[in-house]
Amino acid sequence: MTAKEYLSQAYRLDQRINSKLEQVASLNELATKCTHTITGMPRNPGHGTSTIAEVVTKIVDLQADINRDIDCLVDLKREIVGVIKAVDNTECQTLLELRYLCFKSWEQIAVDMGYTIDNVYRIHRKALSTVSIPERVQ
C-alpha cells in the first residue's frame, strides 16, 4: 500500500458513512409513507410482517452499521494524525492534514496555504515521500 492509498482510507470511509446516512434518510422517508388499512376483517396469520416493521428493522441495522463505521473512522483518523505528525516538515504536515483529514480540494488547500496549485502538488509529492506507513498496514 502506498502512502497516498493509506492516507486516502479516511476519505473513502467517510464517503461510505455519508452514503449510509443518505440510505437511512431514504428509509425514514419511506417509513413515513407506509400506512395501515384498518378494517373489521380478521387478518391472515401467515401474511408476514408489516412493511413498516421491515423498514424500521432496516433502519436500526443500518444505524448500527454506521456507528461501527464511525468508530473505525475515528480510530483511523487518530492513526493518520500520528503518521502525519511524524513528518518533520510542518508545511508538509499542514498540507497532509488539510487533504487527508479535512478532505479539502487541491484548490482550497492552495488558497488556504497561499500557494499556487503547482507548489501545492510539489509539496504534496515531497510530503508523501517522507510518510512512513505503519508496518501492520504494509
Image (tube, helix red, strand yellow):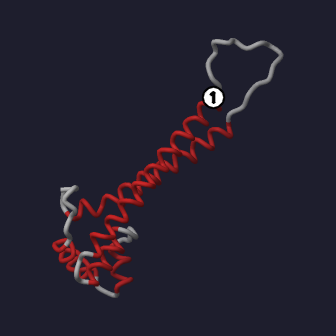
Tell me which residue sits at (65%, 25%) in the image.
50
Tell me which residue sits at (25%, 75%) in the image.
86
Task: Find disc 1 in the rendering and name its residue.
Answer: 51
Label 1 SS:
helix
Please tell me in which quadrant of the rendered image residue 96 appears: bottom left
Who is closer to the viewer here, 29 or 54? 54
Against 125, residue 135 (above or below) is: above
Please tell me in which quadrant of the rendered image residue 31 appears: top right
Who is closer to the viewer here, 106 or 90? 90
User: Total of numbered circles in the picture?
Assistant: 1
Residue furthest to the bottom: 114
Tell me which residue sits at (73%, 28%) in the image.
36
Tell me if 20 is positioned left or right of 43 in this view: left
Residue furthest to the right: 40
**Residue type, numbered disc 1:** Thr
Please tell me in which quadrant of the rendered image residue 37 appears: top right
Quadrant (top left, top right, bottom left, bottom right) of the C terminus? bottom left
Tell me if 39 is positioned left or right of 87 in this view: right
Against 33, residue 88 (above or below) is: below
Q: In the image, residue 67 lies at what x, y percent?
A: 49, 50
Mark 1 Cα shell of 10 Å, populated few (<14), some (14-19), many (≥20): some
Tell me which residue sits at (68%, 40%) in the image.
32
Who is closer to the viewer here, 87 or 117? 87
Q: In the image, residue 107 lies at what x, y percent?
A: 35, 76
Quadrant (top left, top right, bottom left, bottom right) of the N terminus? bottom left
